[in-house]
Amino acid sequence: MKDQLRVSNPPTKPLMTWDGECHFCRHWIERWREITAGEVEYAPYQEIADRFPEIPREQFQRSVVYIDKTGQVFVAAEAVYRSLLSRGSKKWLWWGYQHIPGFAAVSEFGYKLIARHRAFASAITRLLWGNDVRPPTYFWARRWFLRALGLVYLIAFVSLWIQIDGLVGANGILPISDYLSPARGNIGYKTVWILPTLCWFNSSNGFLHFLCGGGVLVSLLLIFRIAPAISLAVLFVFYLSLSIAGQAFLSFQWDILLLETGFLAIFFAPWRLWPKENLIRPGSAIPATALSPVAMFLLKFLLFKLMFMSGVVKLTSGDNCWGWIDHSFHWSALTALDYHYWTQPLPTVFAWFADKHPEWFKKFSVAFCLVVEIIVPFFIWAPRRPRLIAAGLLIFLQLAIAITGNYCFFNLLTLALCLLLIDDASLKRLEGRAPASPAAQELRPPPRSEARSFRTARSLQIANLAAIIVLIITLPLNLWLCYTALKPEADWPKPLVMLYTHIEPFRIVNGYGLFRVMTKERPEIQVEGSADGIDWVSYEFKWKPGDVNRAPRWCAPHQPRLDWQMWFAALGGRRQEPWFENFVIRLLENEPAVTRLLARNPFPDKPPKYVRAILFKYQFTTSEERRAIGAWWKRREIGEFFPEATLRR
């Protein structure tokens, strides 16, 4: 046990001294100043060393020195941990220093190593953090993330609203009432938990319009930052209700991603009716609209999970189009983009041009995609500069995907999550303004009342507590989902199976992985009607490929859900897509709600007597074929998809 130094004239407030001529010390003291939130004073030893003659000047030069109010003196790593006792979340460091074998020795060795190589440590600091190593704040990121999330909700509700009658309305392809009633009869009261939707109260077209219209209105409230937490809760309930009601038409990964993001954002949003600008109380680390660090972690982990799983499943699927490492660690294939541009559900016109890239560039793009999806997500947790680089790469990948494919609001929602990687100091530097120093922050006007400060702290505690509960429940499932992406054959532990069974209906914990196996052919369904069974006329869809001379169209962020389902039906066959028979029946009835989903109804006045579906194989034309015949696609008929059908009395 080493002797404890004491001073005869202890400071009135704990004091940390440091080398004012050390660049490395100067930056990290700024970080400690914010962490300790006014509970500790800081001063260069050059200014106050003479006040404490009991402490050798050489000790001041070797390390930081912490003097508490009783006059006790702590140095080096011990001083650092002792100063953090004022921060509840950091007290474990001091406890570990005192009680965990080896913790103190390792800490002191690390401190001495850095102290002896301050110039190198300073260079590393500038490389990773820049000139500001203070704990990052994310008030700008929260403000614009929530607005972007409100915009995504707005797009999702509006896009669905204009299709809802034809998809699941009373006369739609999959009427919601025909779905819920048998479920209730077969399962009983448990159905409400298995299918959590407000449509149990009312499944009429009017109520579906109420959910969509209400979602639009509340999305606008969120965009304008009016009662954000309440707005997010309502939006989650409404969209979950519509997702359950939408059946096959709302079973896409971006639908569950929106629900999971929206649910976690409830705990991240300000729990106030009208959040004001951020105000810092002098001597406090809690802003007037403080955010929950636990909720922030959950949202960042969601972004990590989304990207990491999407990349890993490509390599573990066994499809060597994405790349495969053999026993000699040799990459093979990387040919996914030889197929992707023209086999994806709804390519844009830019996909045709991207398909003409040289082979080496396509292989490089596949490798780049895998690196960004698998390796870059780990830098979400890195210091500022690598974190910003990771954000830039993730954003670039989403923009590249959005340019060549119509993935509705998926890319926009992922971009919104990427905003959470941009801290306030980074934004100020991008704008050419230096971040405010702690001294400057003290000059900000205080909150209008102590009651407001109390309410802010209390709301933050409630949000943190709720987020901690969500973290405890969902983290084991999320970690296991990431593990199963690495090992798809792994069996789920029974406790996790039980937990997931209870949570899954609410779609707040999900696995992700777009294009696990690359589609190498593009079958397309052409639906035809006839009045006499001899002359057949094609129904024209709004967005999916049909006329070979029509250029691929851009519809994102809108999602034409029938067009998307036609892509899956062509790949899986009509037996795997039971909704298709209902679709044929609605065409034979000339149901307006359904025909409005199409670009052209060849039977506007009188319904057809017969309807059938023919299957074709589509592929982009080459540059030479495009110049010669002017077509964007080439196709050949491969057989019947749905036999000639008519209505019986």
Image: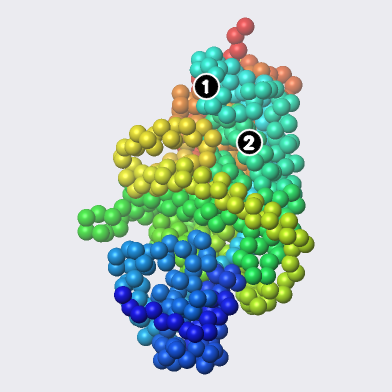
Instruction: Please tell me which residue is depicted at 22% across the width and 59% down the height of the picture.
Output: 328
Q: Mark 1 to mark 2: distance in Å?
A: 18 Å
Residue 219 image offset from top left, x and y in percent: 71, 45
Which residue of the protein is positioned furthest toward the top in this rendering? 649
* Up-down relation of residue 502 to residue 575 (above or below): below
Give percent across and percent down for residue 570: 49, 32
Above or below, 38 against 88 in this view is below
Disc 1 crowd rating (10 Å Cα; few below 14, some 14-19, many 20+) is few
Residue at 46% in and 23% down: 575
First in residue order: circle 1 vs circle 2:
1
Labels in figure, total: 2
Give SS at disc 1.
Answer: helix
The residue where tag 1 is placed is 190
Closer to the camera, 641 or 323? 323
Residue lying at the far right in this picture: please name it: 448
Residue type (three-letter) at the residue carrying disc 2: Val
Asked if residue 436 is positioned above or below residue 258 in the image, the reply reads below
Q: Is residue 275 visible?
A: yes
Pick the front one: 389 or 146: 146
Amino acid beneath label 1: Lys
Q: Which mark is residue 237?
A: 2
Is residue 645 rendered to the left or right of residue 440?
A: left
Q: Residue at x 68, y 43 (%)?
A: 230
> Front-most of 297 and 368?
297
**In the rendering, at what x and y percent does residue 312 appear?**
38, 51
Which label belongs to residue 355?
A: none
Colour mapping used in the image: rainbow
> Which residue is depicted at the point 34% across and 37% down?
492
| SS state under label 2 | helix
- Name the spot of residue 176 as percent of width and height, x first: 62, 23
> Going by the picture, which residue comes out furthest to the front?
8
Looking at the rendering, in which quadrant would you find the C terminus?
top right
